[in-house]
Amino acid sequence: MKSLDSEEVYSGGSYRRAFEIAGRFVEDFLDGIEVGRAVNTDDIESVERIIFVGIGGSGIIGDVAAQLLSASGVEADVLKSYNLPKDKWDLAVAISYSGNTAETIKPVLDLIDHNTPCIFITSDGFLSEFATRKGIPTARVKKGVPPRYGFPSMLGAALGVIDKIGLMHVEFEPEELKKFQRKIMEKNDTESNPAKQAALKIAKSNPIVYVYEEVRNIGYRLKCQLNENAKIYCGFGEIPEALHNEIEAIGPNDLIILPRISIESDEMKETIETLTRFLGGERCLSLKADSKGGLEELLELFMLMDYISLYVSILKDADPMTLPRVTELRKINRINEEILRQARSRI
C-alpha cells in the first residue's frame, strides 16, 4: 500500500486537487451560509411544511437540513425521485450542484405548476437559467468542483436559507471546526490522524457502515464517498434492526464502521459496546468527532467521512475526482436528455 504520510502522494494530479478542495471545507461552508442568507425571501410566507428536492451528493443536503429542522416543529420531506407525491408544501427547496439533474428538474417543474413557492440552490445549468428567466430566488454556490465536493457550500447555502426564513438559527464555532480539520488533514501523520488510521483499516477489509437515527446521514455520506472517491463497495445497515438479521451474514473480512455522536441513548450505547465485544474490537470501528453536540459535531463528522474516503482512494489507487461509470450511464440514459429537452422548452 502507498504511504499516507508521503508528501509525494499529495504533490500532483487528482489527489492534490481533491485535498485542495477538501481543505476548504470550513471556508466553503461559511461562504455557503452567506450565499443562502442573501437570497430574497420576501415573498416566502409562513412555512410549516417544506420539501427538499435533490439526489446523490445534492440529495444528502436535504436529508441533513430535514434532520436539523426536525426539532423546530417544521415538517420536512425529502424527495429523491422523478415523481412528485400528491401533496402540498409551503416551500420547496431544489438542490442540484450542476443545475442539470433530471431527477430534480422534473419534480421542480411540477411544483411550479402547482404554484408551490420555490428556492433553488445550484451553481449553474438549467436551474440557474430557469431561475433568472422566472425570477425564482436562488442561492448560487461557486462553480468548478465535482458535485459531491460541493457538499459544504450547498449545505451552508441550505442552512443560510433556513436561517433567513426564520425556521432555524444557525450557530457554530468556525475555529473549532478548523482545529478539528487540521487534525485530519494530509499534513498530519498517521500516528495522530484518526482519518488516516480509519482508512488503513477500511482499505484492508470489506466495509459495512452501521448507523442509528441520529447518524444516518453521516454514515450514508461515508458509504457514498467510499463508492465514489475510492471506487469500493460499502454495505449499509441500521441498528438495532441489522442485529436481528444480517449479523448472521457478517464475514471474516468484514469491518463494521460505526459513526457515533456524543448524545447516545443508554440502550444504543450498550448495544454498540455489546456488538463490539461480540465481534471483537478489531472487527468494529467507531468514528467520533471532538466536539460534543451541536452543529459543530455534525460538521466535524462529515469532514471526517470525506477525508477517510480520500485516504482510502489513495490506498486503493483510485481517482477521487472522476466518476466514469456514473458519467457514462447518465449519457446513455435517454430519459435524462428527454427531461432536459422538455424543461428547456419551458424557457
Image: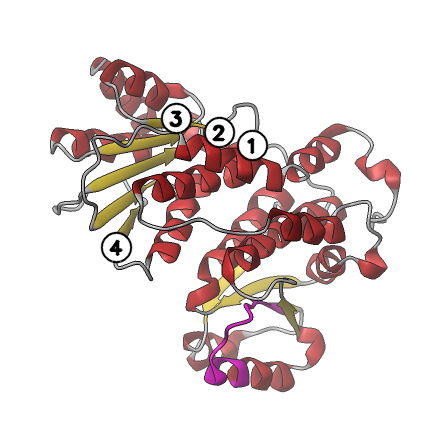
Numbered range of the magenta stretch: 255-270
In the rendered image, residue 244, in percent from the top left (x then y), is placed at 42, 81
Mark 2 — residue? 328
72 relative position to 114: left or right: right
Query: Is disc 2 placed on a helix, strand or loop?
Result: helix
Task: Identify which amino acid the numbered label 3 is placed on.
Answer: Gly
Q: Is residue 259 magenta?
A: yes
Q: Are marks 2 and 1 in contact (CB under 8 Å)?
A: yes
Which circle, 3 or 2, is nearer the viewer?
3
Task: Identify which amino acid the numbered label 2 is placed on.
Answer: Glu
In the rendered image, residue 338, in percent from the top left (x then y), is placed at 27, 22
Q: Quadrant of the C terminus?
A: top left
- Say which mark, if any, is on residue 74: 4
In space, the residues marked 4 and 1 are separated at their CA atoms by 39 Å
In space, the residues marked 3 and 4 are separated at their CA atoms by 26 Å
Res. 139 image quadrant:
top left
How would you rate the neighbour count of disc 2 (Cα within 10 Å): few for under 14, some for 14-19, many for 20 or more? few
Please determine whether, in this image, residue 293 is positioned above or below residue 37: below
In space, the residues marked 1 and 3 are separated at their CA atoms by 20 Å
Which circle, 1 or 3, is nearer the viewer?
3
Mark 1 — residue? 324
How would you rate the neighbour count of disc 4 (Cα within 10 Å): few for under 14, some for 14-19, many for 20 or more? some
Which circle, 3 or 4, is nearer the viewer?
4
In space, the residues marked 3 and 2 are separated at their CA atoms by 18 Å
For the point 61% across and 48% down, which residue is it?
306
